[in-house]
Structures are given as C-alpha cells and as structure tokens.
Image (cartoon, helix red, strand yellow):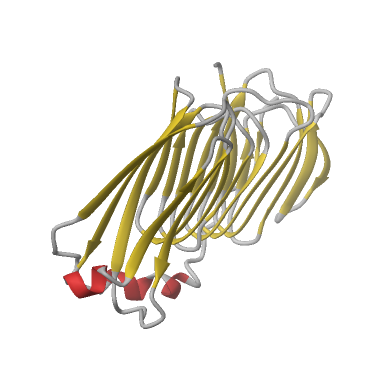
Amino acid sequence: MNVSFRWLRALPVLTLLAAPLAAQDTPATAPVVIERSQAVSANPRISVRNVSGKVEIIAWDRNEVSIVAEKRARKPEVAAKAEIVIETSADRIDIETRFEKSWIWGDKVEVDYLIKAPAGARLDVKVVNAGVITQGITGPANVEAVNGNLDLAGLTAGGRFKTVNGSIDATFSAVAARDDITIETVNGNVDLSLPADATFSLTARTINGGMRCAFPLDKSKNSRTEVVGTVGSGGAAVTLKSVNGNLQVRKHTP
C-alpha cells in the first residue's frame, strides 16, 4: 500500500536572500570563453567552486575531463575582477572562480561551466548563486548551493545534496545497501526518484510542507512534520529535509 501524507502549504520565507540579485543589470559584454581538457583516471575527484552562473557536469565514455567556462559581466573592468582557475592532474580536477579583493557584490560576474567527465567521477561542488545539473555521474557526490536548484540524474552512489533557496530533483539509477543519501533544502521542494526494487530506511522532516512516498513504508514514526520508516529490508539510509517545502519519494523502473 502506498503511503500518502497530507500536503501543506509551503510558506515563502527567507527568499530575500535571492531577491536583490534579480534586480541587477543583465551582463552585456561579450563573454570570455576558456576551454581545457585533461586525461584522467576512471574516477577522478572533481571540485568546483563558483559564485554566480550555472554548473553542468555530464558523463561521457572517455577517461578525459573537458571544461568549457564562459565568463560574462556588464563591463570589461568588472569581468577582469574574476579569474577562472583550473588545476588538473590525472586524479584530480580543481575548478574555481576567484575574485579580486576589490570585488564588491554589485559587480555582477557570471561564469557558466560545462564539464564532461568519466561517469565514475567523484564530485565536490559548492556554489552560491547558481544552479547545478549533473547527468550520468555515478561516483559519490557532495553538491551544495545557496541560491539555486539542483537537478541530478543517473546517480548510483550515496551523497549529500543541499541548497538554501531552491528545489532539489534527484534520480538514482541504482541504490546499494551501503549508500547514505542526504538531501536538504530550506525554501524549496525535494523530489527523489529511486528504482522500483530499492530497499532503504527513510527519515523525512518538513515544517511547512507535506510528504509523500510511493513505496510501501513500514513506519516507526509518523507525525505532521516527520516520518521515519523502512522499505523492504531497509539498507540504504535516505534522509530528506525541508523547512518550507514538500518532500516526495517516487519510484521508477530503470
């Protein structure tokens, strides 16, 4: 029997963190594009640090990492205050947007990253005003944002996925008993999709939101704000948290 919990209205608080950015001018100067590639092992560690701009990481069938960075700003002198730093080796790729000490918040610079990497790459991504997209990356992942959505597809290992103002959509192609999956947001929804034959323990907490689980859940705790239970024999540990948002666990057939 599927479990359905009453949906509650999510309250839009704390969204002022993102509001000032929307009022700024749109970057207008010609973008600066940087391209790099590096031969790597089958499961390199990829670290990305970005302030503003999209980060997209896509799996491909090469032992190589390809990086395309596009920097945009309103004025050339503003763009010059941001440096794209890429450090590479066979086992590690570090990518960072660095700013001069004279940079101020009003000097808007956006850097979009498109990264292609082996499927087994291990991710460590931290951004501020940016969305993160991953497709087909199967290694363990830590992905964090402040103002931005996370859209993660084709995952097969545990990880921690967190944002403050944004929603998280995560799809796992496989789940192992040892996996630890933690997904958290403050102002946003969580939508987690797992294989139909997955077994796991679930802890789901929300204050101003609702919870739904498409799997038959053997509950050990069930309240308005928290649900704890197991699906099947348990195994993988799944934790979902939101303050102002809905939580949902779907099932799919790989």
Residue 249 lies, in percent from the top left, at 61, 36
User: Which residue occupies the extreme front position in the image?
Assistant: 89
Q: Is residue 119 left or right of residue 70?
A: right
| Up/down of 249 relative to 73, above or below | above
In the shown orientation, is residue 37 left or right of residue 170? left
Q: Position of residue 242 (x, y in %)?
A: 61, 56
In which quadrant will I find the C terminus? Answer: top right
Left or right: residue 244 versus residue 27 is right
Measured from the top left, where is residue 119 in percent x and y? 52, 26
Is 215 on the left or on the right of 25, as rendered?
right
In the foreground, 93 or 30: 93
Q: Is residue 132 above or below residue 178?
A: below
Query: Which quarter of the rendered picture does the N terminus lie within?
Result: top right
| Along the line of sight, the residue nearer the viewer: 206 or 147 | 147
Picture residue at 32% right of the left edge, 51% below the top: 112
231, above or below 127, in the image:
above
| Number of numbered discs on residues | 0
Identify the residue shown where x is 21% and y is 74%: 77
